[in-house]
Amino acid sequence: MRILAIDASGQVASVALLTDETLAAEYTIDYKKTHSQTLLPMIDEIMRMIEMEPDELDAIAVSAGPGSFTGLRIGAATAKGLAMSLNKKIIAVPTLDMLAYNYMGTEHLICPMMDARRNQVYTGLYECKQDKVLPLSRQTACSIDELIDNVNSMCRTTIFLGDGITVFRELLKERLTIPYLFAPPHLVKQRAGSLAVAALHYYIEGKYLSSAEFVPEYLRLSQAERELKEKQNADQTNEQG
């Protein structure tokens, strides 16, 4: 089983190749370049380094969202293009599931959190059972206050990871009443290696799609769409007034 994993859901660009249960290659970069500049050269590099032809792949895994609207679209376009040209299936893994797999095997509660702006986060709660990471709640967009209240109510040691830590670290320190840990730099953000492992479990369970079927899951409207909706609501209110 050979799975090429692609993540562009946040600032990090990451690709990996899982061969059976061996992580054969992983290439991750967090630098000031757009994903459209980095993803294809990264994929080409790891395929060249391990001397594998694209048609030898069995499936393409991709982070399905939430995350950066632009990044998700670039990742989706890359995965769909490869899957279509190679006639391979797509394994779409929710971004927060992928993040939670960074801590596969822990006995603690796992809380990935991504900055969603406007004092909100994309988040979910996970725990490990044997060799899987299972969701206790579906990924959602909520206020940071709601997340803190929810985690405190669980009364369990919790590991926080994701780029939301950078924004809300001090607030978490102030408001959390349960024991907690913040992920270290090598585990705090998205990794295609974790995506590939999660994707393998998804594939075994029959959770895969054709290229035409896959669409990213944004969880909420983009900023441009929100601003347009607000303008339309304001115009409608003015007309009624």
Image (tube, rainbow, N blue to C red):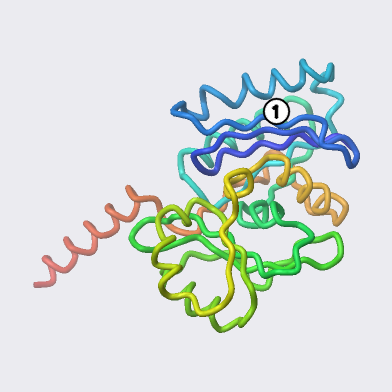
Q: How many numbered dots are placed on residues in this image?
A: 1
Image quarter hosting the C terminus? bottom left
Could you say which is closer to the camera, residue 79 or residue 4?
4
Q: Which of 51 and 153 is in front in this view?
A: 153
Q: Residue 61, how many percent across, how many down?
A: 72, 41
The answer to whether residue 77 is above or below residue 118 is above
Q: Which residue is drawn at 77% across and 15% down?
A: 48
Mark 1 Cα-neighbour bin, 10 Å: few <14, some 14–19, many ≥20: some
- Mark 1: which amino acid? Leu
Q: Is residue 76 left or right of residue 234?
A: right
Which of these two is toward me, 202 or 241? 202
In the picture of the structure, the residue carrying the numbered disc 1 is 82
Image position, residue 154 (x, y; %): 61, 81
Q: Residue at x 54, y 53 (%)?
A: 162
Determine which quarter of the picture holds residue 1: top right
The one nearer the camera, 111 or 68, is 111
Q: In this view, does 82 lie to the left or right of 87?
A: left
From this view, report whether residue 133 is shown above or below residue 213.
below
Residue at image position (62%, 30%) is 78
